[in-house]
Image (cartoon, rainbow, N blue to C red):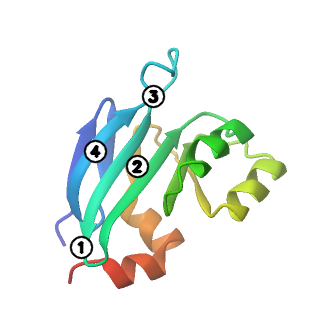
Amino acid sequence: MHHKYVKVDDYTIRLPEGLRLIDLVPLDREESRGKKADYKVTFNSKCGEIIVLIEVTGVPEIRDIKKVEARGVVVKIIHHSGGVRTPVSQLARKYKIALLNCSSNNYIDLELVFINYFKELYNKCKYT
């Protein structure tokens, strides 16, 4: 199986098989004040467009949840390096946000996120 990867800023993102990349853009650059930017990834699928929001952070906080929760998008990810507190974990579950602890801070595997957190959507909407 051949996997597709894209590079944005200093990140490598593995794209999910069966979804077609339309756009991948960094967000909130002006607001980040030296912190890593958020990313918006748009895919075309059998079900229409699927928008993925990725918040990149160190230790996730409630404000990180609010950044992705308030946007009304189905696939929401907080890419972090560890130290998730219980209130953050509970809110993430409530709003169906994937907390993705990554051993490599510069690699995001969207295919595994879809398989592990959004499997029903992925199986229903991917091109075969």
At 67% from the left and 40% from the top, the residue drawn is 60
Q: CA distance from mark 2 to mark 1?
A: 17 Å
Establish if 35 lies above or below 48.
Answer: above
Q: Secondary structure at mark 2?
A: strand
Residue at image point 80% right, 46% down: 85
Give the foreground label among 4 and 2. 4
The residue singled out by tag 4 in the image is 24
What is the secondary structure assignment of the residue under circle 4?
Answer: strand
The label shown at residue 108 is 2
Is label 2 or label 3 in front? 3
Pick whichever, 76 or 101, lies toward us.
76
Q: Amino acid at mark 2?
A: Ile
Precedes in sequence: disc 1 or disc 4: 1
Label 2 neighbourhood size at 10 Å, few (<14), some (14-19), many (20+)?
many
The residue identified by callout 1 is: 18
Q: Please tell me which of labels 2 and 3 falls first in the chain.
A: 3
Quarter of the figure with the C terminus: bottom left
Crowding at dot 4, Cα within 10 Å, few <14 / some 14-19 / many 20+, comes out as some
**Viewer-proximal residue, 59 or 53?**
53
Q: CA distance from mark 4 to mark 2?
A: 13 Å
Location of residue 110 (image quadrant): bottom left
Q: Position of residue 122 (x, y in %)?
A: 39, 76
